[in-house]
Image: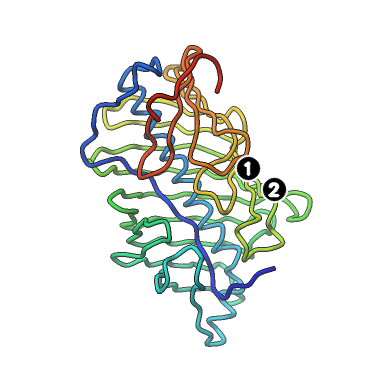
Amino acid sequence: MKKLFGFVVLLAVLLVSCNKEPLDGIEDSGLDTKSAQVVLDEITVENAIAEVDYESDFYFRASHALTDMFRNGMKWGWRKGLRYKTGQCPLITIESEEGGYPKTITLDYGDSTVLRNGKVLSGIIQIYISARPRTDGFVKEVTYNGFSVDSVSIAGVTTMMFTGDNETERVHTVSSDLTITLADGSIIKREGEKVREWISGLDTKFDQSDDVIQVSGYAQITTAENDLYKMDITKPLIKLGDCRHYVEGVIEYSENGVVFATVDFGTGDCDNVATLTKDGETVEIDLAGKAAKYNHGNHHGGKG
């Protein structure tokens, strides 16, 4: 089924424009400007975190084969039509203890590594793997060092523990403590815990097209103004390996325990559309581009 030599990564991270413009369409959503900006930023952040998690998952799944390939002096590269633009890829370094584990994979994107979708990655990601992947209780720790996508940076650590037998049960419990700096210099602190479950695609580890990941959990968000919000995944989010955004699932956003907005990612179509609902009024969100934004003119009462 696989016709590729090398390893492919899907990574996209969030961003807002250097100078945030007034939010056209706010009157349609029923949200005040500050809450609306939180929601739009968070939609983009959540999709970004999904891609970062997916990338590190892919490398740890391929870590054993990758180690053997390097040990045998084999070269690796990307084939046309995959995740990176032709001739682009990170520099990979692997360090491991005797017996193979623990192991650390370092992905160095340098000053510029360009994805097929046009995103420019820079900096370093380190992936620490405590034991052979997909064994009950193993831990993966991802650290971001000077890492950025376009003009937005991600710093901090994400820790994942795997539980299950890799046949009937595959559960990834993820905790994170991240600092995200936007293009305008504002900072978002994000702490939370999620459960990521690989629903399909495990038996074809070098083919992203059949990957389906389900995500549940929550995150606490602290904005640059020290406002505290919470996002709760009330219907599991579904991520497909070859789609840039979530294709299903519902997120609720709240402040002081009061829900002020709900975002719905749809019913499975791989597209750039989500809907935001406030007090029965729904507006369409365009996920394409560098940041989520209102799709002007598309709003109506009731759930979209």
- Between the residue at mark 2 and the residue at mark 1, the CA separation in whole angstroms equals 7 Å
Name the element at disc 1: strand
In this view, 254 is above or below 166: above
Query: Hey, which quadrant is residue 66 in on the image?
Result: bottom right
Answer with left or right where residue 72 lies relative to residue 283.
right
In this view, 199 is above or below 9: above
* Relative image position of residue 285 (x, y in whole percent): 44, 31
Q: Residue at x 40, y 24 (%)?
A: 297
Three-letter amino acid code at disc 1? Gln
Say which quadrant the N terminus sits in: bottom right
Nearer to the camera, 163 or 20? 20
Query: Hey, which quadrant is residue 85 in on the image?
Result: bottom left
Look at mark 2 in the image and give the residue it sits on.
Answer: 199
Q: Are marks 2 and 1 in contact (CB under 8 Å)?
A: yes
Look at mark 1 in the image and give the residue it sits on.
Answer: 214
- Residue 254 in view: yes
User: Farthest right residue?
Assistant: 168
* Relative image position of residue 46 (x, y in whole percent): 46, 40
Q: Residue at x 52, y 65 (%)?
A: 8
Answer with left or right where residue 65 lies relative to residue 19.
right
In this view, 240 is above or below 202: above
Three-letter amino acid code at disc 2? Ile
